[in-house]
Amino acid sequence: MPKRPGLPSRQQILDFIESSDQPAGKREIARAFALRGPDKIALKALLKDMSDEGLIDSAPGRAFHKMGGVPKVTVLRVVDADGDVVWAVPERWEAEAVPVPRLRVKERGKRSALGPGDRILARTEEAGNGWIAHPMKKLQRGEELMLGVLHEEGGKYWLQGVEKKERRDFPVSDRGEAEVGDLVLAEKSGRPPRLTAKIVERLGDPFEPRSFSLIAIHKHGIPHVFSEELLAEATRAAKQPLGEGREDLRDLPIVAIDPADARDHDDAVWASADDDPENKGGWKAIVAIADVSFYVRPGSLLDKEAKRRGNSVYFPDRVVPMLPEELSADVCSLKQGVDRAALACHLQVAKNGTLKGWRFSRAMIRVAANIAYEDAQAAIDGEEDAVAPELVETALRPLWECWQALYKAREKRNPLDLDLPERRIVLDEKGRILSVAPRERLDAHKLIEDYMIAANVAAAKALEAKKAPVMYRIHEPPSREKLVALKDYLKTFDVEFALGQVIRPETFNRILERVGEADFRQEVMTQVLRTQTQAYYGPQNHGHFGLALGSYAHFTSPIRRYSDLIVHRALVDAYRLGPGGLTTEEAAGMERIGETISQLERRAMEAERDTVDRYVAAYLAERVGEVMETRITGVQSFGFFATVDGIGGDGLVPARDLGREYFRWDEAGQRLVGEDSGEQFALGQRLELRLVEANPVSGALRFELPDGKGSGSGAASDKRSRGGPKREIKRRGRPANIRHKGKRR
């Protein structure tokens, strides 16, 4: 278009946008060039032409910036936090011809308070060949996007959220290319109560196999795609020679005992009677772990991505690995009959099961067999053909005999002993659910667990001996507040619990011994678990309360946990075992790394739990209307939650559905008590409930009493006293809905 008198040139506009110290919209440009009347109209047309020509781009709010540049003020998402260096990318980037820029975030203060996934509003500036961001405000994570399923009702499109707590549907302002029934990502806009949803990405059919894990991946922001550049680096790393000086352990019958459906094999074990006269009746053992630190070097793309992920995430239908499969499922996986690089922990075990000594070496191993837990157990129990007879005698029996000594030491240590079974979801080849059942716990599981614990202790103490940095696995004792709550709870069963005593794991074990096989044992066990603190990673040693250990680190799973990779590097550096050791920068940043990977571990746990809940809901969807055996898992003022025995899932029974009687919430006793009848619904109580709703998309269940009124039957009604603070509730209004979160040792 012809240039009007007074109208700035394209170059003048570009220069002004780049030099402006504030967002430059049409109004700011017009003011800077003193434009009036018709010139403002012409400016609008000129800016549109410049946008069409690819010279400028507009940001939300209609501020302009140079095409390929970053708006002066914009929303960024943190993608990497490496010590005190934080990197972020624009949350929205529409310049398809220009790669998404990475901005270095400059924060005030010595330590970064930002981590991967955080969102910030920031001022940006171009510096040299890069960009710098100055945070103005930290925003809520993931507030702008929601997952949901598109449906149509009354001639309008609606979005049903996948969150259990989301009790309403949102009108859809723009459905894009999505079809009814699709799982979608959408942006919320407007303000309550006039919120609408704009669909920005179609993810597919929410009921297709593998969709349940996909929901969790998107909901929790779990990175699940490796870049081509990183995959190329993994290929190069996998092809490198294993190096000189490795201890050759290939003649030993080392075996890897894992789940039958294991996707990777990062540990293998061997044991034999010790011929050292100073350890008469004792054992020597080797715990060989994949030498991941040899392949994944500090500062590499592989290392940065592993740190960004923190750990592998295991779903029933897929694994989202920390490392590319060329490493995690191939060269770093200890497979039968092939030479593999390992970091070997050599243990000397005394007759009484205590560790007399240890050393670490980089080794070459050749696993004699990959054996499923069930097969190893069957072979030891005398079943023929479960495992080759030669391996039973040379590998399995010595392992079991050494483990019996380790187990004696464990029993003497008396760690926290809570028998809480995990759920196992079995899928067919097409990803459809075949069964949901508790995972059987065998001696073979305990054997591997105790060998891994021994190696983890040895790793921590070996690093302490060298005064080297340690990434400890820390589990602190329960807080006094939680102990007081437990005391009040146990009092309702007439079980005494003294607060003045020194609290050890065996303290809780004695409580369970006193309870014995009473009907309420399961609920007491659940409450003991809730009393415990959350384990985490850090460089300061506070011991591991649950395992009753003074020094403990994670060493045995570097394929799937970044914490273990850090411990491997520390050992390599401290004992001069070759390349790939801990750097000075990593040593200085141990606290920050520990905080980050602890957060990422919790993210993975929540994603895995959410996905299992969705599979359970899908499995139960065909049984809606049936009456089934359940157990109460949580009690609140608005109702109680129950799980299906042997299957799992958490479903709400709203207090309003318990009949016309008023119920009081006994918070200390974790129960609802009928004001007139005294009927009770208490934590751990078993009762029959009718399933009235099972939503596979959200994982939510809803139950009701089979006869429409409270029963209050069961041992919990008889064993409890009537004390404790009470709170009257009514069954009116809409109950809130919450998701109960379990804890992991």
Image (cartoon, rainbow, N blue to C red):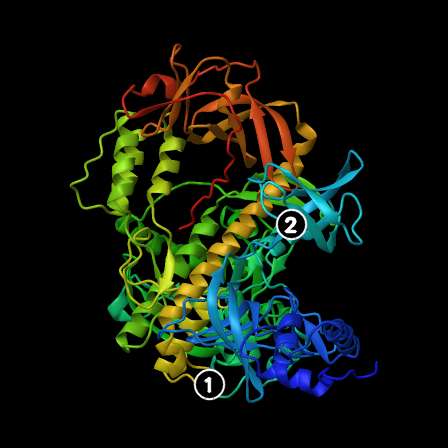
Quickly name the residue at label 1: 579
Foreground pick, 216 / 279 = 216
Name which residue type carries label 2.
Leu
Q: Is residue 13 visible?
A: yes
Tell me: 489 left or right of 498: right
In this view, the residue farthest toward the top is 676
Residue at point 56% right, 76% down?
302
Residue at point 46% right, 71% down?
565
Q: Position of residue 560 (x, y in %)?
A: 52, 64
Foreground pick, 360 / 622 = 622
Residues tagged 2 and 1 counted as in contact (Cβ below 8 A): no
Quickly name the residue at label 2: 147
**Does residue 227 sit above or below 551 in this rendering?**
below
Q: Indicate the quadrant where residue 99 lies.
A: bottom right
Q: Position of residue 524 (x, y in %)?
A: 35, 33
Q: Position of residue 459 (x, y in %)?
A: 35, 69
Foreground pick, 341 / 434 = 434
Indicate the secondary structure of the residue bearing disc 1.
Answer: loop
Q: Quadrant of the N terminus?
A: bottom right
